[in-house]
Amino acid sequence: MSSTIIDIARDCGYSKATVSRAFAKPEAVSPKAREKIYASAKKLNYAPNVIARAMVTRRTENIAFIIHEKQYPAILNPFYSPILETVLQEANRRNYSLFIGARQDMLLPNNQFSIKRQMDGVIFAGEVDKPLIQALRAQSIPVVLLNNHWELEGLPCVEADHFAGAVEATRHLVRRGHTRIGLMAGLFSKQVREARFQGFRSVLNEAGLPLDTRFVKELEPTLEVADAEMTRLLGEGDCPTAFFCTNDTIAVGAMKAILRAGRRIPQDIALVGFDDSYLSRVVEPGLTTIRVDPERMGRIASEKLFAMIDGGEGAGEIIRLKPELIQRGTT
Amino acid sequence: MSSTIIDIARDCGYSKATVSRAFAKPEAVSPKAREKIYASAKKLNYAPNVIARAMVTRRTENIAFIIHEKQYPAILNPFYSPILETVLQEANRRNYSLFIGARQDMLLPNNQFSIKRQMDGVIFAGEVDKPLIQALRAQSIPVVLLNNHWELEGLPCVEADHFAGAVEATRHLVRRGHTRIGLMAGLFSKQVREARFQGFRSVLNEAGLPLDTRFVKELEPTLEVADAEMTRLLGEGDCPTAFFCTNDTIAVGAMKAILRAGRRIPQDIALVGFDDSYLSRVVEPGLTTIRVDPERMGRIASEKLFAMIDGGEGAGEIIRLKPELIQRGTT
DNA sequence: CTCCAAAATGAGAACGTTCTCATTTTTATG
DNA sequence: CATAAAAATGAGAACGTTCTCATTTTGGAG
């Protein structure tokens, strides 16, 4: 069907080696030859077969971004999507393609885990999937973790400082004079959940404020669940004057409930979210939130990964990014 | 580094043909052989090299989803992302992988366009990129268009019925008794823009309502631009009592401006959006909007594409999906 | 014009599979 | 137990490149 390097070679009178060079390393070929070769290629509609190329170079120039199934759906996740977008750009900048992975893609018929597609490297986001990652390492494919470290394996990881973020958020509410502060905590991975909870608690302790367990809720981090939960809380007496929500989706769900109940934000109830996702700019008033620059996360993770791809072993460093409070209208 | 089929063959005493079969077509191999082969594979950490496989089968089991650069950033686009998510699922269900494409990924050193990666098929979303698509066809790679047709080439396309959607939206406002209706139109592709505008205009005509050009605005479809534009409109006198916004992002930006100005939605100003993206559920009150089921779009496009991949030529049918009004709180 | 170094080109192996076709082994039938 | 049919296995070519190394061509200095 489509023509090969041999057809071109025959057509233009050069050897396939020279044709190959004209595409892979144009400066190694004389201008005259290049011209003829490109003309033939155009005529015969030739484009190099990257599969055959990958076969011998042992590089596919593909990387994968895999999100743990718990964080599904991957692309719609407001926290991960801007990171993914950055990784895509970084990959393209280096002439790499990006593959979006899903777990089942990697199960061989013999029940071994494996990266089914040949990938030069993988970024793994969200909860750590140990068997899969071990399989990747066994095939010595570079891996960078995102937002969940795994110290034992010494894998490089880029993550938000969840504890510091929760501290920032809670401290901000305390400074604004709130003495009764609730917590709406999303059911994320254990690592993330605990760090954010500890941050929250440590500020209450240090400020001598009580931790009222009636207003500490763990919930699925969806709009609807948060809305329902907040509606319930508003029904009870004694509702706190402020809430720290451990992500923006929860905060925005809570906002809807509060506004629908006719209470004012921030006068009656103040809110702080987490992530500075797209959502925080959509609502009115804008959501005060904790930002960990997703572009920076994506960029650092990509750089780390490409360094490993090019340079062999990478240090298993954990890079913990400092969060920043973005004040908008909800406090 | 990693072991090949020959290492396994040597280790377990079978030929490489049989080892190959054990992974590609397990039922064609005796249980005894399978067991031995899998044991060797596990021991030597073997996984089939899909590149080598693709080389001979001439199938990569990869498809690409490419969004025209104007619609960038691709992953964050609230309209395309749920479609992309569906395509990802459909691909995985068939054991295919999904690549996210970007334009520059396909430029050869001789300035020919080409799909640089070997892809079994491509879904092309947004404005039609003619030279690229022609290049794909020249390589006889199946292509399905999304939301922008190209009749001349007879390419299959799945798109929203933009005209009908705009009619629904505007008619809804007319029925609610509005007589002065403004338009905030996003600068999408010519096809989409015109269809939506014609829908809007035809309803005004049929209802005998005026089209006041002061309140017909074309703008970049971003939150910030829409917010600024609406703030400006509110400043002028005579502001209409309703607006049709040609996507949700614009509508939500407008909402922010209206609420900030202290006007009430929908009592003072009513709004209808377009897309039923997740934004419409985030805001309070929820946004009345026009829905074209993105999962259906993604599914149909995928089915079309895989039919072409499996069955050769596909008919260049244009499938136009009927939109539906979703009424929420802004009308 | 001769010679040498540098640049350009070519020959052919290698990459790790699958596939076709022939051969061997197993199973079922009488 | 003999035989035919079916199932399982194996040998080796083929897929389309790149890469190494050898050879040829080019260009400049003397």
Image: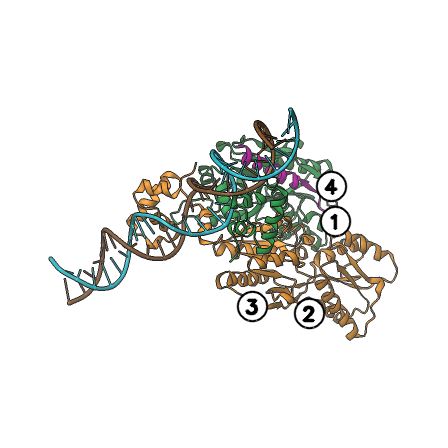
Chain colours: A green, B orange, C brown, D cyan
The residue that label 2 is drawn on is B164
Mark 3: which amino acid?
Ala
The residue that label 4 is drawn on is A327
For the residues bearing labels 2 and 4, Cβ distance under 8 angstroms: no
Pointer 3 local density, CA inside 10 Å: few below 14, some 14–19, many at least 20: few
Between residue A241 and residue A202, name the one nearer to us. Answer: A202
Mark 1: which amino acid?
Pro
- Discs 4, 1: same chain: yes
For the residues bearing labels 1 and 2, Cβ distance under 8 angstroms: no
Height in image: B263 above or below B1?
below
Magenta includes A308? yes
User: Is residue A304 at least partly visible in the picture?
Assistant: yes
Query: Of callouts 4 and 1, which one flags the residue occurring earlier in the amino acid sequence?
Result: 1
Question: Chain under label 4?
Answer: A
Question: Chain under label 1?
Answer: A
| Image position, residue B98 (x, y; %) | 54, 52
Question: On the image, which quarter does residue A160 sit in?
Answer: top right
Q: Secondary structure at mark 2?
A: helix
- Discs 3, 2: same chain: yes
Give the Cα separation between the discs numbered 2 and 4. 42 Å
Q: Secondary structure at mark 3?
A: loop
Which residues are drawn in magenta? A284-311
Q: Which mark is residue A285?
A: 1
The residue that label 3 is drawn on is B315
Magenta includes A291? yes
Q: Which mark is residue B27?
A: none
- Discs 1, 2: same chain: no
Give the Cα separation between the discs numbered 4 and 1. 11 Å
Give the Cα separation between the discs numbered 3 and 4. 54 Å
| Image position, residue B313 (x, y; %) | 53, 65
Between residue B169 and residue A24, name the one nearer to us. Answer: A24
Q: Nearer the viewer, mark 3 or mark 2?
A: 3
